[in-house]
Amino acid sequence: MAEKVLVAMSGGVDSSVAAYLLQQQGYACIGVTMRLYENETAGIPRGHTCCSLDDVEDARAVAYDLGMPYYVLNFTEEFDEKVIRKFVQVYQNGGTPNPCIDCNRYLKFDHLLNRARELGCDYIATGHYVQRWQDENGRWGLRKNDDPGKDQSYVLYSLTQDQLAHTLFLLPCILYFPKFLSDRWFLWFFRGK
């Protein structure tokens, strides 16, 4: 039986490529999008922004085309509590908040991993550009991506050993991206982006 992966799908190219690569490697994939806020509540017009309704529909279309189940997980309360409120507090106190790090720490690699376990998944996967490795003592770590222009290791520094052991990062493989351009699905996807 194939190992199961819960793929965090933003609706963008990176997470869509990660889902495709996982399927090509024989994993059974379930796609999910984390609903973090309502655009109108955040004062953002509806449209293609991070985590917008259009992005949800793009992710759903990709999951459908790949033949994988897809769900939208409502994390709006958690996002407001753990990311937005902290951002405002740090900013008001003269600090430089980084909401991406907090979202990764508290939502993607905490709540999402818990949800994956509830669904019987062995791993979660994201579209981050980073390499995961394990040393001779079994300790997990992160390395910068081979392409320094696409490295995202710095926003993942807070991952625990358990989170690293159960997370797959496929985009260092993106160096082989041109071979996918002849694939029907990628031609369809890139026409819309």
Image (cartoon, helix red, strand yellow):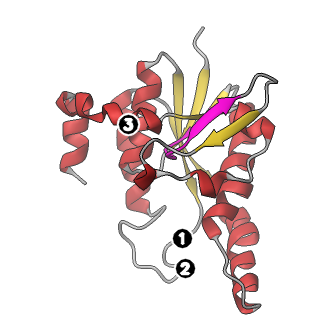
Give the residue at x 71% y 66%. Answer: 77
Q: Secondary structure at mark 1?
A: loop
Residue that label 3 marks? 174
- What main secondary structure does the magenta stretch of the protein show? strand
Give the residue at x 70% y 38%. Answer: 141
Quick check: 71 above or below 119?
A: below
Give the residue at x 69% y 86%. Answer: 91
Quick check: 146 above or below 158?
A: above
Mark 3 crowd level (few <14, some 14–19, many ≥20, 10 Å Cα): some
Specify whether residue 117 is painted magenta. Answer: no
Three-letter amino acid code at disc 2?
Ala
Are the residues flagged by discs 1 and 2 in contact, CB closer than 8 Å? yes
Please provide the residue range marked out in magenta: 124-134
Three-letter amino acid code at disc 1?
Glu
Three-letter amino acid code at disc 3?
Ile
Mark carried by residue 38:
1
* Dot 2 or dot 3, earlier in sequence: 2
State left or right for residue 45 relative to residue 93: left
Compare residues 74 and 80 and report the one nearer the observer.
80
Q: Position of residue 18 (x, y in %)?
A: 45, 36
State left or right for residue 56 relative to residue 105: left
Q: CA distance from mark 1 to mark 2?
A: 6 Å
Residue that label 2 marks? 42
* Dot 3 or dot 1, earlier in sequence: 1
Outermost residue to the top: 1
Compare residues 143 and 100 and report the one nearer the observer.
143
